[in-house]
């Protein structure tokens, strides 16, 4: 999936996991500590207790480069304040809409930022392998990732077995949006299995409605929402091991499991009785923007829309997004009820191009529960929602909205099996190119076999 801009109990008394490892790499660890502003002595209150491990960073500057721009940048900037105030360091934030094009240019020119928020593991892998400029994660970051994040996120931030980047924000892809108010009025219940979901779809059709709405238009990235559909169904129909084989190309893109999964997606999205509620016929999926695709739920010309938690940012101002409100979401249900629930996830990652002590200190902070909670509270203070972390030290109560809190609980549920967005892990020539195009061709009429053969033929080395 491309970088999609969001429209989207603080633990101040304990030390961040990995403090000992950080002390080994930070000059001056255990020395004098500083408060923000002028490098004055810290420790004026318990609010800096979790920051003493970072030492005195007075006069040090750390640059951060990211695709996150105004107004979503402000909660990030605000979340750095405790680190700055308690260590004396200064964080310089630069957001750019040209991030993905400009970051490789800056790296190749020898003037990279200290840290960059990389939106896809595929780009991280490319930077590591092609430039050699990305620094392996320091010990404190690795310790935090081991303690606070599911293995799937560690794997996505690793290249050839080495951890390079900790997750920053995370999202849950495996959601179906619906209207609790409409469900209650019509006597519908949230399905807990795929078969129940299809039975509900048929019931809506029998009542004269169209159950599903969808849209995949996203400019140059048109098609990416369908990659998420296929990934989710691949997980539910074949399990995590086969999913991993598909993503790594251990099995071909046009193999039988992938074909069957795409046909199952087609049983929903190519079914003229099911789609495209409030928007047109099935062909309108290709021309409807992903931002607009779920809106027919509000006037009940559609009832179900599969999209990630960040879709919350696209509902009109004043929409009640809650368990009993205008819209909410449930987990895309399993195909096999006996199998563990599988959740498709995504994230951006913090990559470092410098191993200066102050940069490593800030990396460690960004991987800590302290930062996750500060970021959540900063967003809430500004009335912004749509941001969640997979850090298990995040208190969901600090998040701004019910859907954000639900997302955090899913990410923290150890009974779930997580897998990262497959297109983000695949080579760029596939994951952000032919996979998008192949899915667009498929929804506009090309057969399953022709579409998958096209993508398979594009895999590097074929």
Image: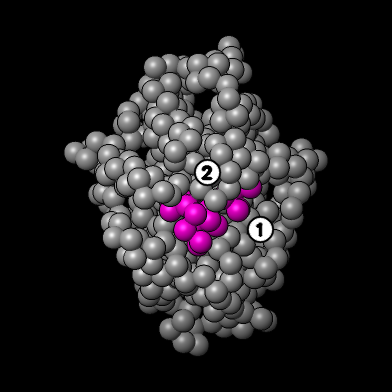
Q: At 70% from the left edge and 42% from the top edge, which residue is drawn?
A: 219
Is residue 432 toward the left or the right of residue 387 in the image?
right
Q: Which residues are magenta?
A: 289-307
Q: Position of residue 194 (x, y in %)?
A: 30, 40
**Residue 210 in magenta stretch:** no
Q: In this rendering, which labeled residue sits more in front, label 2 or label 1?
A: 2
Q: At 44% from the left edge and 63% from the top edge, which residue is drawn?
A: 327
Instruction: Tell me, for residue 68, which label it has, or none.
Output: 1
Instruction: From this view, report whether residue 128 is shown above or below residue 315.
Output: above
Q: Quadrant of the N terminus?
A: top right
Report whether residue 247 is seen.
Answer: yes
- Which one is nearer the viewer's eye here, 226 or 167? 226
Instruction: From this view, report whether residue 14 is shown above or below residue 312.
Output: below
Q: Position of residue 173 (x, y in %)?
A: 45, 47
**SS state under label 1:** loop
Q: Quadrant of the C terminus?
A: top right
**Residue 292 in magenta stretch:** yes
Q: Position of residue 139 (x, y in %)?
A: 45, 50
Q: Which residue in the protein does label 2 denote?
A: 276
Instruction: Tell me, for residue 263, which label it has, or none.
Output: none
* Count of marks, rendered view: 2
- Which one is nearer the viewer's eye here, 47 or 429? 429
- For this orientation, the residue located farthest to the left is 338
Question: Few, some or many C-alpha atoms within 10 Å of disc 1 (few <14, some 14-19, many ≥20)?
Answer: many
- Which one is nearer the viewer's eye here, 354 or 158? 158
**Main SS, magenta residues:** loop
């Amino acid at each position: 999936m491309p970088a999609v801009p969001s429209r989207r109990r603080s633990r101040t008394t304990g030390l961040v996991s990995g403090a000992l490892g950080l002390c080994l790499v930070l000059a001056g660890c255990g020395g004098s500590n500083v408060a923000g502003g002028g490098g004055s002595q810290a420790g004026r209150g318990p609010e800096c207790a979790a920051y003493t491990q970072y030492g005195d960073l007075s006069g040090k500057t750390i640059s951060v480069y990211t695709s996150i721009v105004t107004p979503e940048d402000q909660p990030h900037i605000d979340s750095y304040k405790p680190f700055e105030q308690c260590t004396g360091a200064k964080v310089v934030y630069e957001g750019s809409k040209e991030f993905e094009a400009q970051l490789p240019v800056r790296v190749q020119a020898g003037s990279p930022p200290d840290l960059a928020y990389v939106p896809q593991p595929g780009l991280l892998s490319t930077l590591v392998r092609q430039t050699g400029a990305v620094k392996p994660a320091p010990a404190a970051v690795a310790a935090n990732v081991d303690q606070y994040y599911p293995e799937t996120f560690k794997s996505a931030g690793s290249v050839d077995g080495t951890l390079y980047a900790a997750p920053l924000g995370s999202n849950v892809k495996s959601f179906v949006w619906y209207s609790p108010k409409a469900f209650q009025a019509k006597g519908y219940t949230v399905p807990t299995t795929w078969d129940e979901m299809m039975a509900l779809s048929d019931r809506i059709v029998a009542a004269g409605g169209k159950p599903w709405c969808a849209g995949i238009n996203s400019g140059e990235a048109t098609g990416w929402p369908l990659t998420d559909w296929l990934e989710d169904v691949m997980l539910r129909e074949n399990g995590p091991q086969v999913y991993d084989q598909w993503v790594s190309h251990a099995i071909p893109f046009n193999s039988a499991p992938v074909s069957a999964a795409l046909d199952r997606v087609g049983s929903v999205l190519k079914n003229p009785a099911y789609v495209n509620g409030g928007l047109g016929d099935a062909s309108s999926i290709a021309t409807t923007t992903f931002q607009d695709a779920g809106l027919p739920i509000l006037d009940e010309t559609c009832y179900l829309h599969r999209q990630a938690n960040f879709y919350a940012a696209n509902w009109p101002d004043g929409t009640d997004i809650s368990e009993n409100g205008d819209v909410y979401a449930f987990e895309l249900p399993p195909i096999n009820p006996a199998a563990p629930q599988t959740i498709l996830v995504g994230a951006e990652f913090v990559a470092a191009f410098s191993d200066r002590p102050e940069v490593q200190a800030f990396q460690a902070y960004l991987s800590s529960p302290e930062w996750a909670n500060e970021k959540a509270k900063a967003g809430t203070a500004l009335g912004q929602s749509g941001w969640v972390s997979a850090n298990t030290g995040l208190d969901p109560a600090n998040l701004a909205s019910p859907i954000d809190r639900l997302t955090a609980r899913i990410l923290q549920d150890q009974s779930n099996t997580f897998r990262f967005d497959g297109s983000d892990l695949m080579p760029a020539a596939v994951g952000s190119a032919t996979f998008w195009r192949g899915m667009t061709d498929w929804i506009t009429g090309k057969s399953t076999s022709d579409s998958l053969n096209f993508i398979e033929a594009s895999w590097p080395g074929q």
